[in-house]
Image: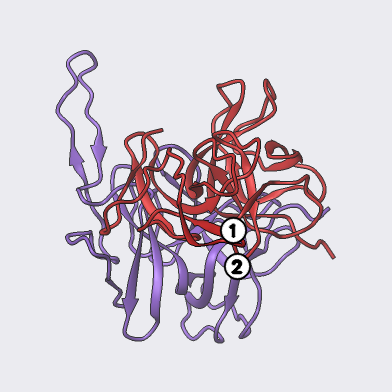
Chain colours: A purple, B red
């Protein structure tokens, strides 16, 4: 993958890089500092980028979490846009995204794909058919679809050709919600 | 909320404002039709950033009576008019959250479709953290229920105001078929 951002504004963190952020001045009362994205990056921002092989995609800027690898499936659900490795599905219809970098700390930031052709992490060696629904059965990893565990807005676009990654076509994917 | 639009084009209506629009094509028999004031366009989607809630996406739509800030609306016509979201009935229509009290089909405003939204709920209703939600009363968020869930949305934090709840959303839609 070699995605290049195509927004009008310049100087965004490259799609596959991690932004270590900037640290605010020490607060007098608490002695604490805060790490925030390096401008013009902003938490929750969505940009478009293009890859010579995979075409156009959309990417959202989020904070990291331990054990994230390129392709990890994450959820993001709080005011700090912190991520969590997507837990095994449990009929909770939360938005998900695919990590573009090994962004492994809550104080660092990176891009996560939410539309286009994504390379998502799967259990090593797992066989997945072409044009098949997928799910999350192990935290942060793609698997075959399962009851209550499917990803809505995602489909494999070819048989997986690497041990650890599978190509998905995604469009603002979310975990499966209610079935009643 | 204090969202500032981040697009390269200038002159958009501020996120929390209502655009009264302009009338074009006036003629003696039928009058004219109201369109958004340029550069606003029906269905345009822009990015905006808030110092507290980060970045989000917003779509320009026409209003409907009884809309308040935080109202949940559907938009499903070629003219981008809205309706307060009806009680869920397994109909997978896109929804959005009103950013202004845009109460007329001839005025225009922004509706949030991704990011962290403040959505209207039944006054005093308790909603848990990280919970699925639904539409059980027209235009309002409630707890999830069969056939009434909002997909692509989750609460975070227990709701701290009587009438609003924070949701993380990404192009939310009402629950569709279950068979």
Query: Viewed as shown, does residue A119 lie left or right of B129?
Result: left
Residue A32: percent from left, percent from top: 23, 24
The local secondary structure at tag 1 comes to strand
Residue tagged 2 = A153
- The crowd level at tag 1 (other Cα within 10 Å; few <14, some 14-19, many 20+) is many
Q: Are marks 1 and 2 in contact (CB under 8 Å)?
A: yes
Name the residue rendered at 63%, 84% in the picture: A129
Please, which chain is the residue tagged with disc 2 on? A
Q: Earlier in the sequence, mark 1 or mark 2?
A: 2
Residue A60, can we see it?
A: yes
Residue B65: percent from left, percent from top: 65, 39
Q: Quadrant of residue A34?
A: top left
Residue tagged 1 = A174
Instruction: Give the Cα separation between the discs numbered 1 and 2.
Output: 7 Å
Residue A100: percent from left, percent from top: 36, 65
Of residues B91 and A69, the one nearer the viewer is: B91
The local secondary structure at tag 2 comes to strand
Looking at the image, is A154 positioned above or below residue B150?
below
Query: Viewed as shown, does residue B93 lie left or right of B11?
Result: right
Please, which chain is the residue tagged with disc 1 on? A
- The crowd level at tag 2 (other Cα within 10 Å; few <14, some 14-19, many 20+) is some
Name the residue rendered at 75%, 46% in the picture: B86
Q: Are marks 1 and 2 on the same chain?
A: yes
Looking at the image, is A170 positioned above or below residue A162?
above
Residue A63, can we see it?
A: no
Residue A143: percent from left, percent from top: 61, 69
């Amino acid at each position: 993958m070699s995605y290049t951002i195509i927004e009008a504004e310049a100087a965004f963190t490259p799609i596959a890089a991690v932004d270590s952020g900037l640290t605010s001045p020490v607060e007098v009362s608490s002695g604490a500092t805060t790490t925030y994205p390096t401008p013009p990056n902003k938490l929750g921002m969505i940009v478009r980028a293009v890859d010579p092989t995979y075409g156009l995609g959309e990417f959202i800027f989020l904070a990291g979490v331990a054990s994230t690898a390129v392709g990890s499936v994450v959820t993001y659900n709080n005011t700090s846009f912190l991520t969590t490795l997507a837990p095994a599905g449990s009929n909770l219809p939360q938005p998900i995204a695919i990590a573009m970098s090994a962004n492994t700390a809550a104080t660092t930031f990176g891009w996560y794909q939410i539309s286009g052709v994504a390379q998502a992490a799967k259990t090593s060696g797992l066989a997945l058919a072409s044009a098949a629904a997928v799910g999350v059965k192990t935290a942060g990893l793609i698997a075959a679809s399962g009851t209550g565990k499917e990803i809505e807005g995602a489909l494999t676009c070819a048989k997986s050709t690497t041990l650890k990654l599978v190509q998905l076509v995604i469009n603002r994917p979310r975990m499966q919600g209610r079935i009643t | 909320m204090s969202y500032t639009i981040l697009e390269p084009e200038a002159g958009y209506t501020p996120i929390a404002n209502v655009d009264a629009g302009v009338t074009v094509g006036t003629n003696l028999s039928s009058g004219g039709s109201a369109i958004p004031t340029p550069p606003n366009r029906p269905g345009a989607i822009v990015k905006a950033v808030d110092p507290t809630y980060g970045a989000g996406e917003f779509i320009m739509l026409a209003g409907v009576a009884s809309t308040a800030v935080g109202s949940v609306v559907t938009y499903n016509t070629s003219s981008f008019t809205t309706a307060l979201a009806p009680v869920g009935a397994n109909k997978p229509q896109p929804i959005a959250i009103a950013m202004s009290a845009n109460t007329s089909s001839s005025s225009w405003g922004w509706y949030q479709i991704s990011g962290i939204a403040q959505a209207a709920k039944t006054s005093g209703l308790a909603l848990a953290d990280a919970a699925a939600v639904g539409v059980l009363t027209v235009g309002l968020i409630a707890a999830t229920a069969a056939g009434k869930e909002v997909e692509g949305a989750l609460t975070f934090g227990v709701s701290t105001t009587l009438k609003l709840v924070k949701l993380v959303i990404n192009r939310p839609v009402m629950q569709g078929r279950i068979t």
